[in-house]
Amino acid sequence: MTQEAFLQLHRKIATFRGDSAFSTWLHRLAINVVLMQLRKKGLSLISLDEAMEPAQDEGPGRGFGTQDPTLTGAIDRLALERAVADLPAGYRLIFILHDVEGFEHNEIASMLDCSIGNSKSQLHKARLKLRETLRKPFPPESQT
Amino acid sequence: MTEQFNKNDCAEFQSRLPELIGAGEDLSRHAHIQSCELCRALLADLETIAEAARQLLPAVEPPDEIWRHIESAIQDKSS
């Protein structure tokens, strides 16, 4: 896929108008390559719009009014990786772009053709969902 | 400090959280955070998660042959 992304870059470089940072444009191109590959493999793939607004039951619960224990100390990396993998696609995409890869909301909005407010909102929901997951005890089969 | 909060205050504060956090404001001085233990804990958790996420960036170097493959594929497509 890295190779295909670079081939796309070679084909499309002339269409880069400089409206956004080159890294943002390249990232958007790479995301499109991944989406195209997934479609070719026939995997059921939701559209980016659907991914951006997961179904109601996939979203985070409301945080207020609950006295559940808080996350204490450092989060176990493996537990966080599992929790991120379980996020709805749209939440995961924005969480990784912002919190893991360090893109700013304006860059993400440009990459994903959404508003900056939408990017902030989706990131917040992603973090809430992760918090919800990380506060649950591990299921017995995953304890080693 | 007296821990006083009600669900309406929390709901109102939490509905503004995405914008407040996204704007990079220091929320530790926010009046609601100073008086509400639940929202203080929520904010601390969200900050912990964001902090932990920075460790997830994989340090993956593409294999050496990838560049040769790309060069060769570009030449094939160009010819």
Image: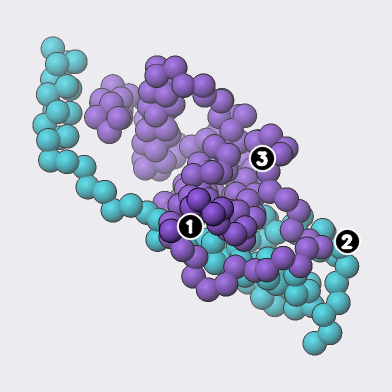
* Rendered image: mark on residue A143: 1
Sequence order check, earlier mark of 3 and 1:
3
Please check whether the numbered discs 3 and 1 fall on a single chain. yes
Q: In the orientation shown, which residue stands out farthest toward the bottom?
A: B1
Disc 2 residue crowd, few under 14, some 14–19, many 20+, Cα 10 Å: few
Can residue A102 be seen here? The reply is no
Q: Where's residue B37, x and y in %?
A: 75, 75
- Secondary element at tag 2: helix
Tell me, what colour scheme is on the image? by chain
How far apart in space, not on screen, are marks 2 and 3 (Cα)? Answer: 24 Å
Q: Mark 2 touching mark 1, by CB under 8 A?
A: no
Q: Mark 3 touching mark 1, by CB under 8 A?
A: no
> What color is chain A drawn in?
purple
Task: Give the residue type that dot 3 points to.
Answer: Glu
Left or right: where A15 falls relative to B11: left
Q: Which residue is mark 3?
A: A58
Task: Give the residue type that dot 2 points to.
Answer: Asn
Q: Which residue is mark 2?
A: B8
- Secondary element at tag 1: loop
Q: Where's residue A42, x and y in %?
A: 44, 17
Determine the residue positioned at 62% across, 40% down. A115
How far apart in space, not on screen, are marks 3 and 1 (Cα)? Answer: 24 Å
* Rendered image: mark on residue A77: none
Q: Where's residue A41, x and y in %?
A: 39, 19
Left or right: where A40 falls relative to A50: left
Task: Give the residue type that dot 1 points to.
Answer: Gln
Of residues B24 and B5, which is closer to you in this image? B5
* Chain letter belonging to callout 2: B
> What color is chain B drawn in?
cyan
